[in-house]
Amino acid sequence: MTAHFVPADLRLYFVTDPEGPAPIEATVEAALRGGATLIQIRDKHSGDDDLIALASRLAPACRERGVPLVLNDRVEAATRAAVDGVHVGQSDTDASVARARLGPRAIIGLSATNLAEAAAVDAAVVDYCGLGPIFATATKLDATPPLELDGFQAACARCPVPVVAIGGITADNAGRIIEAGADGVAVVTAISRTDDPEVATAALRAAVDARPPRG
């Protein structure tokens, strides 16, 4: 048995940056214009009501382009918000609880940081795995040691669901990550902390599209 719903396009996954220099709404709009294919609202400090309000502001632009919008971890908020699902970590709400709460059509993503966690992903519950960090990243100060490409490739090969790579990804290395087995790449600061998020997104998308995943 496989998960009930897989997002149509995982190629370029933008995770919002609450500390970015521009308003999140403006950055998401730019990322959508540049070719982002999935948006995650991630903010560990804001309350549920604030995240729900933000989701309601982002949802129309995402829907207009057919791009799914998910919340990081906040399963209860996701039930009240205009979002398509949630992404949970190993220490967040259990993915099976998220699936039961949000239903068969919700997108459920799960983080994995090593081969064992990637291999243990339940394809009956989870639609995709966010695997990383691939390279060292300043976005998450408590991140585990980077997998690097060899470790990522080994973990990716054992994961039973589509894999989105995360951690230290840029337009310069995104193509190599796709070649190593990723179905897509997830980024934060490579879009949010640039002078032109739309141009940065377009460069990432071009790098991903230039290297079709291993078949």
Image (tube, rainbow, N blue to C red):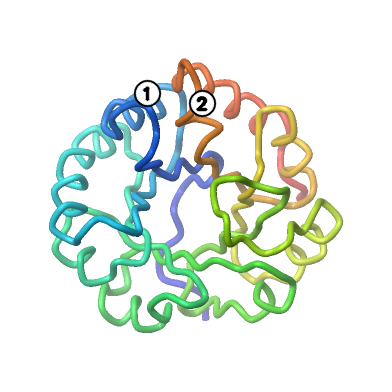
Which of the marked residues, 1 or 2, is nearer the chain's N terminus?
1
Residue type, mark 2 in image: Thr
Query: Which residue has dot 1 on it?
Result: 30
Residue type, mark 1 in image: Ala
Residue 25 lies, with reference to residue 149, above or below; the image says: above
Toward the right, the furthest residue is 150
Q: Secondary structure at mark 2?
A: helix
Q: Residue at coordinates 32% horizontally, 65% vertically from top-left?
A: 106
Q: Quadrant of residue 93?
A: bottom left
Q: Are marks 1 and 2 in contact (CB under 8 Å)?
A: yes
Q: Secondary structure at mark 1?
A: helix
Residue 111 placement, left or right of 107: right
Q: Quadrant of residue 74?
A: bottom left
Estimate the x, y position of residue 20 in percent, counting from the top left.
39, 34
Estimate how packed mark 1 is, as few (under 14), some (14 to 19) or many (20 or more) residues with alpha carbons within 10 Å. Answer: many
Residue 125 lies, with reference to residue 179, above or below; the image says: below
Towards the viewer: 124 or 121:
121
Estimate the x, y position of residue 179 in percent, counting from the top left.
78, 43
Estimate how packed mark 2 is, as few (under 14), some (14 to 19) or many (20 or more) residues with alpha carbons within 10 Å. Answer: many
Q: Residue at coordinates 42% horizontally, 81% vertically from top-left?
A: 94
Query: Which residue has dot 2 on it?
Result: 201
Q: Residue at coordinates 82% horizontally, 51% vertically from top-left?
A: 149
Cα gap from disc 1 to disc 2, whole angstroms: 8 Å
Residue 43 placement, left or right of 11: left
Q: Residue at coordinates 61% horizontally, 50% vertically from top-left?
A: 166
